[in-house]
Image: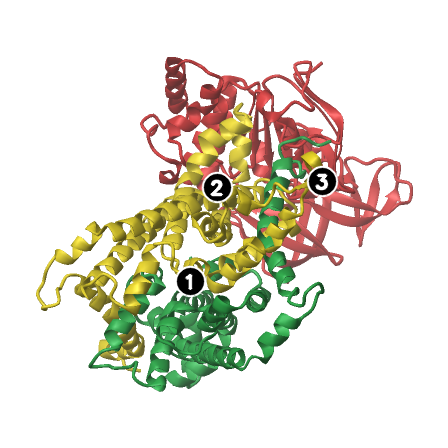
Chain colours: A green, B yellow, C red
Amino acid sequence: MDKSLNSKRVTGWALFWTIAALLYFFVPIYGTLDFSLRMKRGEISLMAYQIVFSDPRFLESFRYSALMGVITIIVSVLIFVPTVYWIYLKLPHIRPVVEIITIMPFIVPVIVYVFGLIRTFGKPPFQLTMTPFKTDILMLAGYIVISMPYMYRAIDVGMRSIDVRSLTEAAQSLGSNWLQVLFNVIFPNLRIAILSGALICFATVMGELILGDFLVRPALGPYMASIGKTKAYEPAALSIISYVLTWISLGFIQFFSHGGDTQQQITGR
Amino acid sequence: MLASPLWNWIGIAPFFVFIFLFLILPSFNLFTGAFYNMQGNFTLENLQVFNNPFVLKSYLISVQVSLITSLVGGVFGFFVAYAITVGKAPRWLRNLIMTFSGLAANFGGVPLAFAFIATLGRTGFITAFLKQVCFAGAASEQVCPLNPYDHGFNLYSLAGLVLAYTYFQFPLMILTITPALEGLKKEWREASANLGASSWQYWRDVALPILLPSILGATILLFGNSFGAYATAQALTGGSIPLVPILIGQQIRGDVLGNPHHGYALALGMVVVMGITIFGYTVLQRRTVRWIKA
Amino acid sequence: MSFLQLTNINKKFGSTAAVDNFNLAVEQGEFISFLGPSGCGKTTTLRMIAGFEYPTSGSITLQGNDLTFTPPNKRNIGMVFQSYALFPNMTVAQNIGYGLKIARKSKEAIEARIEELLTLIHMENMGARYPYQLSGGQQQRVALARALAIQPQVLLLDEPLSALDAKIRVELRHEIRRIQQQLDITTIYVTHDQEEALSLSDRIVVMNQGGMEQVGTPDQIYNFPETEFVARFVGQINLLPVEVVNPRDGVIKIGDHLLRAGRFGKLNGKPVRLAIRPEELHPGYLEGSNNLSGKVGSITYLGSIIRIRVDVDGNPVSLDVFNERKFKPPSVGETYQVNFPVEASWLI
C-alpha cells in the first residue's frame, strides 16, 4: 500500500468530514421532502404540492416575484453594464470607490436597508408607498440594490476577461458609435457573465422576504411566511419547491460558466 | 470622440443617480437620524438606547448566536474544506461538496426555517424517527428514550436557531476557505518533510500560520453573516427570541422603543458591527493572498 | 558498494512506466546531472531519491543503508525545488534554520549555522527579510542554504534555475558548483538545459521516456553519443542519409561525394546516416578530409556564431562558423564547399 507523502489514498478523516457535510446538507432536505409527501394520512401523495400549485395566492405571488425578478435583471444590466464599461475604459481611477459602493449592501443588512428605505421614501417628498405601482418601483430599486453585489461583480469579472479597450477601438475604427459598440460588441461578449449574474439575481429576488413583507407587496417570500403560520404540510412543499428553484438557477450558472470564478459569483466575495 | 472629462462622467451618471437615490440617501437618513432628536436638534442622546436592557439583551443574544454559529460553522467548514483539498477526497466528492455548499450557502430565510421545522419540529422527520427507537423496558413496557423534546430540546429556541444557521454557515466557510487551502503549495509540505518535519510539525510551523489570517477572516465573515440575518430567525421563532435584526424589524412596524430615533441608533449600531466585520475580513484576506502569491 | 546506489528502479503510474530500469552508482562528492526533455522521468527519479515517491520496484541505498521506503523526513537528503518553496510566513533566517530547529539543535548552534550559510550564499544582512521581498535569484540561494543547513549526505536540485533570467542563471549555476565543490557534497541535478548539465557535471545521465540513454562524462556524452537521441538532444548534429560503398573501411557515398566515417559498427545493409557536428565543418576544400558541396540554403546569425545551411543532394547540412570580422559569408544560392575531418564523423 502506498503510504508515501503523495499517495492518492483518501484518509479516513477526510471521508468522515465529507460524509458529515453531506449528511448535514441532505438530511433536512430529505426530511422536508418526506414531510411534504405525507399530507394524506398513511400514504405518500403529492397532495401538499397540488394544494400549493392550485392556490391562487401562490400563483399570484410566484408570478409577481418572477416578473419582478426579470425586471430587476433587465434594469440592473442596463444600468451596470454601461457603468462598468465606462469605468474600465475611461475612469479606472474611480474603480476603488465603486467597488466599495457595491460592497455596501453587504455591510448594511437588508433589514437595516429596508428600514432606511421606508423611512426615506415613505414620507414626503417622495411618498412612494402610497400606491401599489409606486411601491413596486421602490421594490424594484430595493431588489436592484440587494442583488447589486452579485450582479455588479459578475459583470465586473466578465468585463475583466475581455479586452475592452482593444475591442472598442477595433469597433470604432470600423465605424461604430458608442451605442453600437455597447450593444453589438460589449453585450454579446458578456453573455455568460450577465447570465450568471442574472441567475443569482433571480434566485435572490424569488427568495427575498424582508422587502416584500415590510412594503406589503404580494411577493413569494411573504406568501410563504404567511402560509407557515397556519399550515403544516404546504410550507414543507414550498420549501422543496424553493430549494429546487435555487438548485436549477445555480446549476445553470455552473453549466454556463465552466472554469469561471464560480465561488466569487455564488458568495459575491 | 469627445475626450472632455464631463463627457466621461455622463456615462456613469445613471449609476450614480440610482445609487444616490436608493442607497446613499436611505443610509444617510438612517445615520443622521441616529444623531437627531424629535425636535430636529443634533444630539447624542439616542445612543442611550444601548443602555435599554431590552436592547442590551438583543445585542447579547445576537452576539452569542453569531459567535456560536461562526465557530461551529467555521470549524466544521474548515475540516470539510480540508478533507476535499489537502485530504485528497476524490474529485467527484469534492465537486459534490462544492456544488452543495454553493446551494446551501444561498438557502436561507423562510424555506430553511420550514425545512428545519419539517425535520426537527415536534412532528418532524427526525423527531418521529428518534421517537420510534424503543426498547423493552422494565415491566415489559416500551421505553423510547430518544425523543429530543423529552430532553428539553425545542427547535424554536436558541439551539434550534443555531442548528438552522449552521446550515448556511458551514458551507459559506467551505467556499471561502477552500481557495486558501488550495493555495497551500504541495512543495511546502515536501520541503518541510525534506527538512525532517513530521506532518503535525508542518501544520504547526507552516500551514496554520499561513492559513490563520484566512481562517480568522472567514470566521469574522461568518459572524457578520449571522449577525445580520433576519428572515430565518423570524420564520423560525416568530420574533420570540430577541435578536437585533428582529428588534429592528419590530421598529419598522411600529415604534416599540418609544422614540423612532432610537430605532435609527439601533440600525447604526448594527451597521457598525457589520462594517467592522467586513473590514476585518478584507484586511485578513489580503495578508493571506500576499503570502500565497509570493 | 558506492555511496549512493540506485538499482533496477521502476516507477509505474497505472500502466504508464514513468521510470524504466534505472541503474546508477554515485560516488561520494560527485556532481551528477539527469538531463532530458520534459516527461523523461528525471524528476520522478529524483523524487524517489528524496522519498516523495516510492518505486514500484528496485532499491535505493545510501552508504549501504536501504532507503527505498524510508519516509522523506527521515532521510537526511536535502532538496532544492524548482519553485524554491520557501515558507512565506518565515524570514530568510527562519527558513534556513528550520531543519535545525526540527532536529532540536541549540539556539546558539542554529544561529551560528545560519550566519555561516548566509555568508556562503553572500546574503549576510538579509536574514530578517521575507521571501516575498526577495528576487527570484535570491530566493533560490536561500532555498539552497536551507537545504544545506542540515548537512545532508546528498543534495538534490530539481531544475532550480529554470524560473530565472538567462544572466542570473549562468551566475547562479557557477555559485552552485562552487559551493558544491567547497562542501564536497554529493549532488544530483535535474535539468533540461544541456548547457547547464555539460558545464556543471562530473557525469551526466541522459534520459528519454523513462529510460536511460547514456551515462558518461560531459566529454563522452558530447563527443561519443551512443544513441541517436543523445546525439540529437545534446548539441546540434547533422545526420546525412548515405549509401554504404565499402562496409569494412567505412566508405560511404552521398550524391557524387565519396566519404569516410571515423567510427562505425557493423554495416549489415541497414540504412545508415553519417553524423557530424556543425562546428566540425569548415568552409572550403581540404585534401585528406571529407569534402562536400552544395547550394547555400540559408544563413542565420546567432550572435557569436553564423550557421550556414548547405543543401547537399537535397539534404540540409549545417556548419557553424565563428562570426569573425575576417570571415566572409557566402550568399544564398551560391555553390559552397565544406570539409570535415574523418575522425569527427561516425555512422548511426
Q: Quadrant of the N terminus of chain A?
A: top right
Residue type at mark 1: give it. Answer: Ala
Marks 3/1 same chain: no
Determine whether the residue tagged by mark 1 lies in a helix, strand or loop: helix
A149 shown above or below B224: below
In the image: residue A117, left or right of residue B176: left
Q: Quadrant of residue C153?
A: top right
Is residue C289 visible in the rendered structure shown here?
A: no
Q: Which residue is mark 3?
A: C208
According to the image, label 2 marks what residue?
B75
- Callouts 1 and 2 close, C-beta under 8 Å: no
* Picture mark count: 3
For label 1, the crowd category at 10 Å Cα-Cα, with few meaning under 14, some 14 to 19 and many 20 or more, is many
Q: Secondary structure at mark 2?
A: helix
Q: CA distance from mark 1 to mark 2?
A: 24 Å
Callout 3 secondary element = strand
- From this viewpoint, which residue is outermost toward the right? C268
Which residue: 45% across, 35% down?
Answer: B208
**Alpha carbon distance from label 3 to label 1:** 64 Å
Tell me the number on the disc at residue B231: 1
Q: Residue at x 46, y 43 (%)?
A: B72
Above-or-below relation of B40 to B76: below
Amino acid bearing label 2 = Val
Horizontal side, residue B136 vs residue A116: left or right: right
Taking the image as drawn, is residue A166 in sight?
yes
Q: Quadrant of the C terminus of chain A?
A: bottom left
Residue placed farthest to the front in the image? B139
Q: Residue at x 39, y 58 (%)?
A: B229
